[in-house]
Image (cartoon, rainbow, N blue to C red):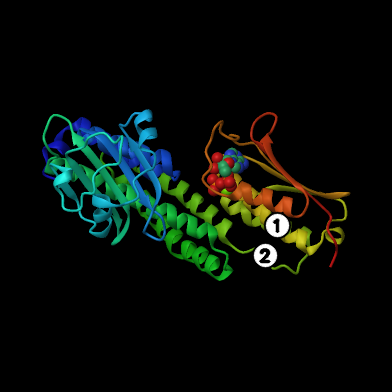
Amino acid sequence: MPYHALRDPDKLQALLDAVLSVEADLEMAPMLRRVVEAARTLTGARYGALGVLDLSGKSLAEFVHVGMADDVVAKIGRPPEGAGILGSLILDPEPLRLAEISAHPHSVGFPPGHPPMHSFLGVPLRVRGEVFGNLYLTEKQGAAEFSAADEALAVALASAVAGALDNARLYARVTELTLSEDRERIARDLHDTVIQRLFATGLSLQSVVPLAPDRELRSRLEEAVADLDDTIRQVRTTIFALEPPPAARSGVRARVLALSAEAARALGFEPAVRFAGPIDNAVADSVASELLASLREALANVARHADARAVDVELSVGDDVHLTVTDDGVGMRPGGHHTGSGLLNMATRAELLGGSFSLGARPGGGTELTWRVPLGKRA
Ligand SMILES: Nc1ncnc2c1ncn2[C@@H]1O[C@H](COP(=O)(O)OP(=O)(O)O)[C@@H](O)[C@H]1O
Ligand SMILES: [Mg+2]
């Protein structure tokens, strides 16, 4: 980008920070807010806002704005619904720069209580032709209108956000997939192509390490190889979470063991499994499938979040079915945010069967998960 703004190292750093934080975070509202803040600072705008369309593409699913005082926002009442210039930006998703908003043919004016706004810069959030929403900035400070450099910055930020939204939707879609065929196919693709490629790249990088002329470069190559290994572990966790439960006909005990053995690939070690009571005879099929699905999610969470050295799986059957999964990892982060629905699913599975679910800190570090349901009627 041949623009002056991008040669300013501070601005460039702010841009990179904004973009990188987008990649790292799937939680919407705070991420969108950070992007709008960055866009406003970078372009010198007084106000900034970002609207994300819902799946129908007609109304806004998310709207975040910065720069307006709370009492002004309260006076205006509703967020914009996409009439006027914002609407035309949706219909004709191209960057738009105006010195005077009210002079635009699509302008519909502002609602009562809205502060005056003159200069305007709007850019669509777009990935592969699909429009996710738009980012807009108003009231350029210290100039009558936004510049071409401001536009370039806004376009760069918008495309980073659109990429992140695209990822988030893809992620949500994968989580929602119920057709086991699709899940199996995706798991297979990940295994056969993604893992194989990462693996091959890791090997070839590793082979050039000794050829590197200096120590600094060698250690950076080694870090890259370690990162790739880590990524492979993460992808394996995803595959594990996607794969269908093992064939339902074998007994609960065998299925718990098979699942735990299978989790070893994602965990990097085998969980220790203990049983107590008449497992195979007492657990109803309807309970078994929910139990196995919950255990799968619990182990996937340990692999994904815990950074644990050991996991204990305990299944005991007495008056009820009682599963505990204990890890010695980092534990739940205080105030850590939710990205998925795994915990919710486990809780719902337990509740639907008349049981209970809890996840807490393990004394000495890590987490302790308890999933408990009544025995259920044998078929
Ligand atoms: N064993 C664990 N160790 C540490 N943190 C965990 C563990 N299990 C779950 N968590 C935390 O709880 C959050 C919610 O888990 P979940 O609902 O399964 O969503 P997801 O796995 O998609 O993030 C995780 O993002 C993580 O922060
Ligand atoms: Mg999870």
Instruction: Say which label, 2 or 1, has the lower sequence index.
Output: 2
Residue 218 appears in the figure = no
Instruction: Rate crowding at label 1 as few (under 14), some (14 to 19) or many (20 or more) other CA atoms within 10 Å.
Output: some
Q: Is residue 182 above or below residue 138?
A: below
Instruction: Rate crowding at label 2 as few (under 14), some (14 to 19) or many (20 or more) other CA atoms within 10 Å.
Output: some
Residue 43 at what x, y percent from top left?
A: 20, 36
Please state, as top left, top right, bottom left or bottom right, where the C terminus lies in the image: bottom right
Query: Would you identify the image quadrant in which residue 65 lies?
Result: top left
The CA distance from mark 2 to mark 1 is: 9 Å
Residue 25 at what x, y percent from top left?
A: 42, 42
Q: Secondary structure at mark 2?
A: loop
For badge 2, the amino acid type reads: Pro
Q: Is residue 9 left or right of residue 296?
A: left
Would you name the residue on which mark 1 appears? Answer: 292
Q: Is residue 233 above or below residue 216?
A: below
Would you name the residue on which mark 2 appears? Answer: 246
Residue 109 at what x, y percent from top left?
A: 23, 45
> Quick one: 329 or 225, which is closer to the camera?
329
Asked if disc 2 and disc 1 are in contact, CB closer than 8 Å, the reply is: yes
Task: Determine which of the numbered discs, if any, sits on residue 127 in the image.
Answer: none
Q: Secondary structure at mark 1?
A: helix
Q: Quadrant of ligand 1?
A: top right
Q: Is residue 218 left or right of residue 103?
A: right
Q: Is residue 168 left or right of residue 301?
A: left
Q: Residue at x 16, y 39 (%)?
A: 119
Residue 9 at what x, y percent from top left?
A: 19, 32
Labels in figure, total: 2
For badge 1, the amino acid type reads: Leu
Residue 149 appears in the figure = yes
